[in-house]
Image (cartoon, grey):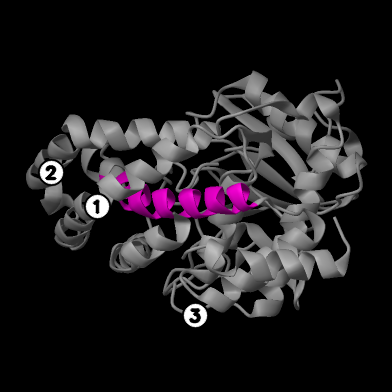
C-alpha cells in the first residue's frame, strides 16, 4: 500500500475539517489447558477463534494469594467462579472475575515478561492518558500497598477493569471490517496518541524512529547469515509442523526479492528526525474492542515503547485494511482529522507497513523452527501466516510503482 498515492487528498480533507510494539511481537507458548469461552456477551475478544470452542474452568491456579493483595471490594464473588481465557499469541493468561466492583480482568504476564521497571512505565502511561481524557484503556487497579502489579510464584500479575465489547476478529483473515469501524479505530488511536503527548515527559527529542533502526538491523542480519540459519533450521525441524514448513519456501523466496528494496527505504528513513512518543507497537485488529461501530476499548500494552506514531498507524491499519486502498484512505483520513501528519510521516507509515509485512513471516518461522515454540491454535497461526504471505507477494508485485511515487 503506497501512502503518498492519496496523502494529498487526505491532508486536504483534514484541513477542511479544521481539526487537529512492534509488529508481530514475539508470542510465548500457551499451555494446552488454557480454554476459550463458548459464549461471551462481554468478551475481551480472543485474537484467534478455534473451530471448536470449549468452556471449562481451569483449577490449576489458586488466585487467592494474588487477590489477597487487593482491598476486599476486589475479591471474587462467591456465587460466580472466575473464568479462565486464552489471550491469543502473547502468552498472557487472563481470568474474568466478578467482584463487588464489577467485572475485572486478572492478567498473568508470561515468565519472559519480568521487567518491573518497564511495566511500571507502561502503567504510568496508561494512567496518564486516562487522566488526560482518553478513557478506553484498562488502567490497572492498585493493591492495598499502592502498587499496580503483584509478583507471585515467578510471574507478574495485574488486576484491571474488564472493558466491554468484542474485537472485530476474523480468524480466517479474509473478511475485512467496514470503513466505519476502521474510521472509529483510527480515531481512537489518534486520541490515544494525543493524550499520551499531553505530559511533556513523554515527548522525547526528535530523532530517527527507533523501530526503523531496529528493522534495518534485522534486515541486514538476515542478508548476512540469519536467512541461511533459518533455512537450515526449517530443513531440520520442519517435520514438527509440516503445514508451516511447506509455506516457508515461498515466503523466503519473496523476502529475498523484497529485501534490497525495503532496506533502501529504511536506510532513507533513518536520516529523518521525527517525533518520538509512547507507542503501543502491538496495536492490532484483535486488540480493539467494539460495541456496534463504536470503539469501547483498546487492550494489550505489553509491547509499548517510545517510537514514532507511524508504527502504530501502520500496524493497526495493516491488520484492518490489508491492501484495500479505500480502507487505508478512510483510516488515515480519520487519524489526520485529529493528528495531522507531514508528507514525511506518511512515508514513514508506508515504510513501517512494508518492513512489517516483510519481517513478520520471518518472525513466525524463527519462533517455531529456531526457538521451538508451539501454539495451541495452529490454524489461527497458519491463517495469520497466509495473510502475511499474500500481502508480501502483492507488495513485491507493486514495488516498482510504489518506488516511482515515493521518489
Q: CA distance from mark 2 to mark 1?
A: 13 Å
Report x, y in % for residue 160: 77, 43
Q: Earlier in the sequence, mark 2 or mark 1?
A: 2
| Label 1 vs label 3, nearer the camera | 1
| Label 2 vs label 1, nearer the camera | 1
Residue 268 lies in the magenta stretch: no
- Does residue 320 sit above or below 107 in this rendering? below
- Does residue 358 sit above or below 46 in this rendering? above
Callout 1: helix, strand or loop?
helix
User: Label 3: how many residues lie within 10 Å, few (<14), some (14-19) or many (20+)?
Assistant: few
Residue 361 lies in the magenta stretch: yes
Query: Do the numbered discs 2 and 3 sit on residues whose CB atoms are within 8 Å?
Result: no
Left or right: 32 in relation to 372: right
Query: Do the numbered discs 1 and 3 sit on residues whose CB atoms are within 8 Å?
Result: no
Q: CA distance from mark 1 to mark 3?
A: 25 Å
**Residue for badge 3:** 175
**Residue for badge 1:** 255
**Residue for badge 2:** 231
Query: Do the numbered discs 2 and 1 sit on residues whose CB atoms are within 8 Å?
Result: no
Q: Which residues are magenta?
A: 343-365
Q: Which residue is at the front of the view, 137 or 240?
A: 137
Left or right: 181 in relation to 389: right
Q: Earlier in the sequence, mark 2 or mark 3?
A: 3
Most common secondary structure along the magenta stretch: helix
Residue 136, by quadrant, is bottom right
Q: Quadrant of the C terminus?
A: bottom left
Report x, y in % for residue 325: 52, 75
Residue at x 31% of width, y 38% of height: 219
Q: How many marks?
A: 3
Q: Answer yes or no: is residue 161 visible.
A: no
User: Label 1: how many residues lie within 10 Å, few (<14), some (14-19) or many (20+)?
Assistant: many
Callout 3: helix, strand or loop?
loop
Amino acid at each position: 500500500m503506497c501512502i503518498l498515492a492519496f496523502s494529498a487528498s487526505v491532508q486536504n480533507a483534514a484541513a477542511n475539517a479544521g481539526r487537529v510494539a512492534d509488529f508481530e511481537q514475539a508470542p510465548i507458548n500457551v499451555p494446552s489447558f488454557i480454554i476459550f469461552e463458548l459464549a461471551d456477551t462481554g468478551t475481551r475478544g480472543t485474537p484467534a477463534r478455534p473451530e471448536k470452542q470449549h468452556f471449562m474452568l481451569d483449577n490449576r491456579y489458586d488466585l487467592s494469594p494474588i487477590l489477597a493483595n487487593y482491598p476486599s471490594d476486589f475479591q471474587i464473588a462467591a456465587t460466580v467462579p472466575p473464568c479462565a481465557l486464552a489471550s491469543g499469541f502473547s502468552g498472557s493468561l487472563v481470568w474474568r472475575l466478578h467482584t463487588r466492583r464489577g467485572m475485572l480482568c486478572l492478567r498473568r504476564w508470561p515468565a519472559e515478561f519480568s521487567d518491573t521497571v518497564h511495566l511500571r512505565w507502561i502503567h504510568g502511561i496508561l494512567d496518564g492518558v486516562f487522566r488526560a481524557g482518553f478513557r478506553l484503556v484498562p488502567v490497572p487497579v492498585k493493591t492495598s500497598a499502592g502498587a499496580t502489579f503483584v509478583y507471585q510464584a515467578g510471574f507478574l500479575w495485574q488486576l484491571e477493569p474488564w472493558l466491554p465489547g468484542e474485537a472485530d476478529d476474523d480468524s480466517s483473515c479474509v473478511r475485512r471490517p467496514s470503513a466505519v469501524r476502521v474510521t472509529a479505530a483510527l480515531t481512537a488511536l489518534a486520541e490515544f496518541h494525543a493524550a499520551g503527548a499531553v505530559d511533556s515527559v513523554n515527548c522525547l527529542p526528535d530523532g530517527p524512529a527507533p523501530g526503523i533502526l531496529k528493522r534495518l538491523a534485522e534486515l541486514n542480519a538476515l542478508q548476512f547469515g540469519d536467512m541461511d540459519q533459518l533455512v537450515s533450521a526449517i530443513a531440520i525441524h520442519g517435520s514438527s509442523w509440516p503445514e508451516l514448513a511447506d509455506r516457508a519456501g515461498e515466503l523466503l523466496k519473496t523476502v529475498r526479492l523484497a529485501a534490497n528494496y525495503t532496506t533502501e527505504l529504511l536506510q532513507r528513513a533513518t536520516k529523518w528526525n521525527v517525533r518520538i512518543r509512547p507507542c503501543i507497537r502491538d496495536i492490532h485488529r484483535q486488540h480493539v474492542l467494539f460495541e456496534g461501530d463504536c470503539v469501547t476499548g483498546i487492550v494489550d500494552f505489553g509491547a509499548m515503547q517510545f517510537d514514532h506514531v507511524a508504527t502504530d498507524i501502520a500496524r493497526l491499519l495493516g491488520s484492518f485494511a490489508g491492501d484495500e486502498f479505500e480502507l487505508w484512505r478512510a483510516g488515515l483520513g480519520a487519524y489526520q482529522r485529529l493528528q495531522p501528519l507531514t508528507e514525511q510521516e506518511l512515508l514513514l507509515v508506508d515504510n513501517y507497513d512494508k518492513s512489517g509485512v516483510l519481517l513478520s513471516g520471518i518472525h513466525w518461522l524463527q519462533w517455531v523452527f529456531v526457538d521451538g515454540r508451539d501454539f495451541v491454535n495452529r490454524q489461527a497461526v497458519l491463517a495469520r501466516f497466509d495473510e502475511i504471505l499474500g500481502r508480501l507477494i502483492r507488495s513485491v508485485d507493486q514495488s516498482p510503482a510504489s518506488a516511482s511515487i515515493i521518489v
